[in-house]
Amino acid sequence: MRALLRTRKQLVREQASHVQRIQKTLEDANLKLASVLTNIMGVSGRAILRALIEGETDPDHLLTLIDRRVKAPRDKVHAALQGRVTDRHRFLWRLHLRQIDTLDAAVAEIDQEVDRDLDPFRDAVRLLCSIPGVSDLTAQVVVSEIGIDPRIKCPGAGTPLPDRGPPHLPRLRRGMHGRVCALATTRALASDGPTRCAKAHPG
């Protein structure tokens, strides 16, 4: 599972890189889409990109593709859609969108594979998700990096954990180490089981 989630992280980074290239190409075409849309890869952004790729450049028509929920004033959106689009711009948008969609499919496949591998760790993931701010994906990453029994990485009983965990651990693992150990302690105490993290402090 660790290899899958690390690969997922890399694919998401690649997606972000392609989105940045799309944004740079929009700017090169003098289209200020990012100034009126929170996410240029959202529903409205993709609709406009598809229309531009197909040859549409009329700001009035492009304006009709903007979702009603977009808060930017219509006159500002109209101004942002007035640019100078060339065939090279269309080629680059088509190329990057295709790569993003391919990466989307790959990430979805990884998520399905992770879900199949997750059965022995669902309780641990559920415990981690009880920490405010910890998402399901973050919990999966923590479990894959630290393991299902964090007590093996904790100091002996009576030794407080440092606030950010042992310095040799990667940053994510240091940041979550204390919380994982504290949860392990709570679970062990609830079941009257032994624990070596009795004085663990949240990281």
Image (cartoon, rainbow, N blue to C red):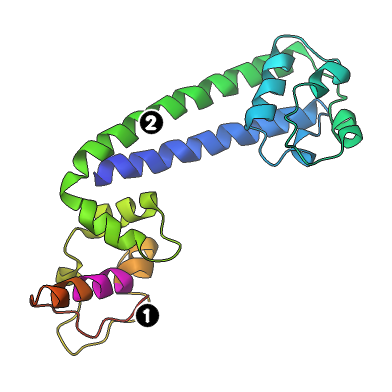
Q: Is residue 189 left or right of residue 5?
A: left
Q: Residue at x 22, y 75 (%)?
A: 186
Q: Residue at x 38, y 28 (%)?
A: 106
Q: Residue at x 78, y 41 (%)?
A: 71
Magenta-drawn segment: 178-185
Element type where label 1 sits in the image:
loop
Question: Which residue is the site of mark 2?
Answer: 108
Considering every residue shown, the one lying at the far left of the view is 193
Identify which residue, 109 or 98, lies in the foreground. 109
Residue 27 in view, yes or no: yes
- Majority secondary structure in the magenta region: helix
Q: Amino acid at mark 2?
A: Ala
Identify which residue, 194 or 103, lies in the foreground. 194
Element type where label 2 sits in the image:
helix
Judged by depth in the image, the label closer to the viewer, 1 or 2, is: 2
Question: Which residue is the site of mark 1?
Answer: 163
Quarter occupied by the C terminus: bottom left
Residue 22 x/y as whole percent = 66, 29
Quarter occupied by the N terminus: top left
Residue 53: name its quadrant.
top right
